[in-house]
């Protein structure tokens, strides 16, 4: 015997995980749960443009700005290629969170210590991520070895 989580009525449980006495109480619990989520102002900050965007339940949410979507795809492909190069050389590869790297470096290029431009047309001041110790010299694909960099600084390096 246990008490219903919604109405408080005592009932006999059929399963050890059962929390509600009837289907109506279960439906009410779902309604309350999702109403609570809707009442919250759930938003994320775009790592590229800084704008707020609504978070969606059950899907990977991201900023819907076309420039951000395009740049985000370029950065993801670039990171995957970097990891593949390290794997081919037998180096260490770990899952990398580009948002965390960007936050850690505060959007400042590690080569010239100037702020990077996060979205827009390609140019020397556009955001890229750089392996501090190059893969060709035995560098790994880890959070510690990745840094924010200008596209132009990375090319010159």
Image (spheres, rainbow, N blue to C red):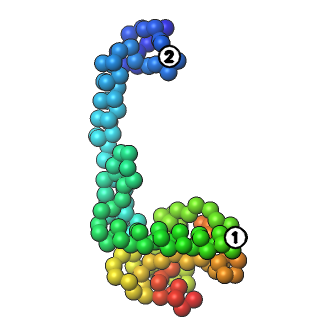
Q: Is residue 69 left or right of residue 145?
A: left
Residue 15 is tagged as: 2
* Percent position of residue 88, x then y: 66, 72
* Percent position of residue 64, x then y: 30, 62
Instruction: Report the residue at 52% width, 62% height from top.
Output: 97
What element does badge 2 sit on? loop
Instruction: Report the residue at 40% width, 18% height from top.
Output: 20
Residue 91 is tagged as: 1
Taking the view exactly as shown, the residue that stands out farthest to the bottom is 156
Taking the view exactly as shown, the residue that stands out farthest to the front is 88
Any part of residue 106 in sight = no
Any part of residue 9 in sight = yes
| Disc 2: CA contacts within 10 A as few (<14), some (14-19) or many (>=20) | few
Instruction: Report the residue at 33% width, 62% height from top.
Output: 63
| Disc 1: CA contacts within 10 A as few (<14), some (14-19) or many (>=20) | some
Q: In this view, does 93 lie to the left or right of 26?
A: right
Quadrant of the rendered image containing residue 124 = bottom left
Q: Is residue 147 left or right of residue 34?
A: right
Instruction: Report the residue at 62% width, 69% height from top.
Output: 141
Residue 23 is tagged as: none
* Percent position of residue 148, x then y: 51, 75
From what the image shows, is residue 7 above or below residue 97? above
Closer to the camera, 88 or 141? 88
Of labels 2 and 1, earlier in sequence is 2
Count of numbered tags: 2
* Percent position of residue 113, x then y: 51, 82
From what the image shows, is residue 53 above or below residue 121? above
Q: Is residue 142 left or right of residue 72?
A: right
- What is the C-alpha distance between the residues marked 2 and 1? 49 Å
């Amino acid at each position: 015997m246990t008490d219903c989580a919604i109405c408080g009525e005592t009932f006999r449980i059929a399963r050890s995980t059962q929390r509600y006495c009837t289907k109506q109480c279960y439906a009410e619990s779902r309604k309350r749960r999702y109403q609570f989520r809707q009442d919250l102002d759930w938003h994320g900050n775009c790592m590229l443009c800084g704008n707020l965007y609504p978070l969606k339940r059950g899907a990977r949410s991201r900023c819907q700005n076309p420039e951000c979507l395009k740049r985000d795809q370029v950065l993801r492909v670039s990171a995957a290629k970097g990891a593949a190069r390290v794997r081919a050389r037998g180096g260490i590869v770990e899952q990398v969170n580009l948002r965390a790297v960007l936050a850690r470096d505060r959007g400042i290029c590690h080569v010239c210590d100037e702020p990077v431009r996060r979205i827009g047309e390609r140019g020397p001041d556009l955001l890229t991520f750089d392996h501090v110790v190059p893969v060709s010299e035995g560098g790994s694909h880890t959070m510690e070895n990745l840094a924010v960099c200008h596209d132009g600084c990375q090319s010159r390096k």
